Amino acid sequence: MRNELELEAIIEDYLLGNLTEEESKSFDLLRKNDPAIDQQVVTHRFFLESMSNYASRLQINNQLNEIHSQIDVETLANEFRPHSSKIIAIWRKNKALIGIAASFVVLSLISIYSIQHNSKQADSYLQMRKDVVKAIKSQNNLIRNIKTNAETSHPKALSPGNYGGTGFAVSTNGYIVTNLHVVQDADSIYIQNSKGESFKVKVVHTDPLYDMAILKIDDNRFKNLSAVPYTINKNSAGIGENVYTLGYPKDDAVLGEGYVSSKNGFVGDTTQYQVSIPVNPGNSGGPLLDNAGNLVGIISGKESQADGAAFAIKSTYILDAINAIPSDSLGKKPSVNRKSALFGLKRTKQIEKLQDYVFMIKVYN
């Protein structure tokens, strides 16, 4: 508990600029190497900004009350007549106080607009998730009707038909990473490979903080994959770096290409990249790779009010999720920061190798 409080105090000093230059550099290095601390910094920054906004609004309110108490409202009411000379006299007598009050009103309106604008920004990020959930529910209703009509002749038949997103293999023996929001609250989950084969999977690990889930294929028909061709990049991708993703916004795999447009994600989230790639509901959970075939992130959402602005969780957090699984239960998993089997291949050849390790996620609620 004491260590936690001390860390909170250091984070606050860091954000307020109270650390020395050497201390700040050391803490920057600690953030880079410890994702949990980095996330605490992001959370604490949001807390401080919220408190600052609240304090500003409270101060404005108190100042308005003080100004109001200094204005003789009764005298103004008695003296106010349509004659222009009296209006001018009243204005000259009270213009300073009225001007200050008007300024605070404007500041209040700006503050309110800022809060509403931030709320709209949050809605624009969540829109992708809502679209996924809406599609899933709509298709679930259709599937339930089909199942009900077919129960008499095929009581055991179950043909998963709706999709929730994309996932990709991180081991040869059937461990798959996707977004948590894709599979959350599902009654049953299936994956489908590029050959159209479906396998039942189960959720073995979730990380709500980073919106990630690890699935395990739980099906006797599944045969182990060959060595995973891509590596996991522990380093950050640079702004302007070319990247691409393969996902299932429809029944066929779709390639999306673009570049890293910002090293921070939605509202400055340091756990994400912003990437200039067109994505749609169903792309969630898809791998983000660089030209060398290194896994640099996982597609998690998009900005609905800006075309081609998507967000991807950084690969270092994928490693954290994988490390949460006992190492003796994992088959051969992707190497870290070694040369990828996709390195040096043309994009078409990379996709040929990659498509066997990227899956459509199908869910039932």
Image (cartoon, rainbow, N blue to C red):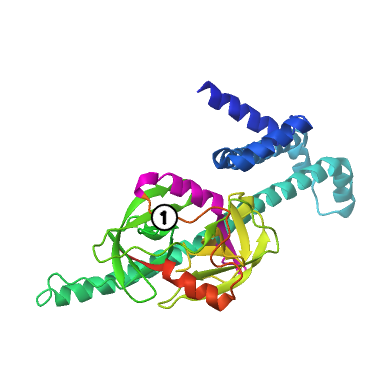
Where residue 26 sits, quadrant-wise, is: top right
Q: Is residue 251 above or below residue 118?
A: below
Q: Is residue 185 magenta?
A: no
Q: Is residue 334 above or below residue 76?
A: below
Residue 231 at x, y percent in the picture: 53, 58
User: Which residue bears the numbered disc 1?
Assistant: 332
Kindly state the secondary structure of the residue where label 1 is placed: loop
Q: Say few, some or many: other residues with alpha carbon within 10 Å of mark 1 (under 14 / 14 to 19 / 20 or more).
A: some
Task: State whether residue 123 appears in this view.
Answer: no
Q: Amino acid at mark 1?
A: Lys
- In the picture, measured across the screen, residue 82 lies left or right of residue 38, that is right
Q: Is residue 42 above or below residue 347?
A: above
Residue drawn at x 48%, y 75% is 352
Query: Magenta region: which residues?
Result: 302-329
- In the picture, measured across the screen, residue 162 lies left or right of residue 64, that is left
Residue 321 at x, y percent in the picture: 45, 48
- In the picture, measured across the screen, residue 288 lies left or right of residue 111, that is left
Residue drawn at x 59%, y 67% is 343
Q: How many marks?
A: 1
